[in-house]
Image: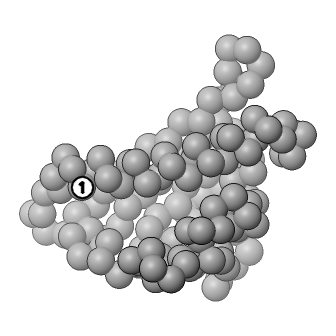
Amino acid sequence: MILDFGNLLPKLLPQLIKSVDFTQGNGEAGSIRQISFQDGIGLKSVTNRVEAVDPENLSYSYSLIEGEGLLDKMETIVHEVQFVPGPDGGSINKMKSTYHTKGDIVLTEEEVKEGKEKALGMYKAVEAYLLQNPEAYA
């Protein structure tokens, strides 16, 4: 499912995401992906670099490397995602975000909370889809 991110998110969040395109590579480590947002969102696009893909351990990591306004205070934001077995036969999604700020800039709790809520919103949309369509990525 994470590997199909570019196809899935524009379908689930068409009001937010216009397109997801690889500008370099095909999804393997080192690939560059641009996410374009719908007009009126307040953000035109962001660019991610795929850091690692580990299908065996169901883990994936990527860095936010470009995005107008987002990286005024940060060098990068690294997201690490892993799926682990759940207690009832399902899975649990673990996500860790590491903010690498520029110089001695310190992010406020509100800025961190806002970023976390945006990421969780996307994951909640994916979770709702998978619960309604369990065969989609089985």
| Colour scheme employed for the rendering of this structure | one colour
Secondary structure beneath dot 1 equals helix
Residue drawn where x is 24% and y is 76% of the image: 72
Is residue 84 or residue 54 the one in the foreground?
84
Residue at 65% x, 77% y is 19
Count of numbered marks: 1
Residue closest to the far top: 87
Nearest to the observer: residue 105 or residue 46: 46
Spot occupied by residue 83 in the image (x, y as percentages of width and height): 65, 36
Q: Residues within 10 Å of mark 1 (few under 14, many from 20)?
A: few
Q: Would you name the residue on which mark 1 appears?
A: 111
Residue occupying image coordinates x 21% and y 50% = 110
Q: Quadrant of the C terminus?
A: top right
Lateral position of residue 67 relative to residue 99, left or right: right
| x then y, percent, for residue 47 | 50, 76
Looking at the image, residue 77 sits to the left or right of residue 62; the answer is left
Q: Residue furthest left?
A: 104
Residue depicted at x 67% and y 21%: 86
> Can residue 49 be seen from the camera position used here?
no
Q: Is residue 103 visible?
A: yes
Residue 27 falls left or right of residue 17? right
Image location (x, y in percent) of residue 132 = 79, 38
- Does 34 appear above or below 80? below
Frontmost residue, 28 versus 105:
105
Q: Position of residue 136 (x, y in %)?
A: 86, 46
Query: Which three-letter amino acid code belongs to the residue tagged 1?
Result: Glu
Indicate whether 19 appears above or below 112: below
Residue 3, quarter of the rendered image: bottom right
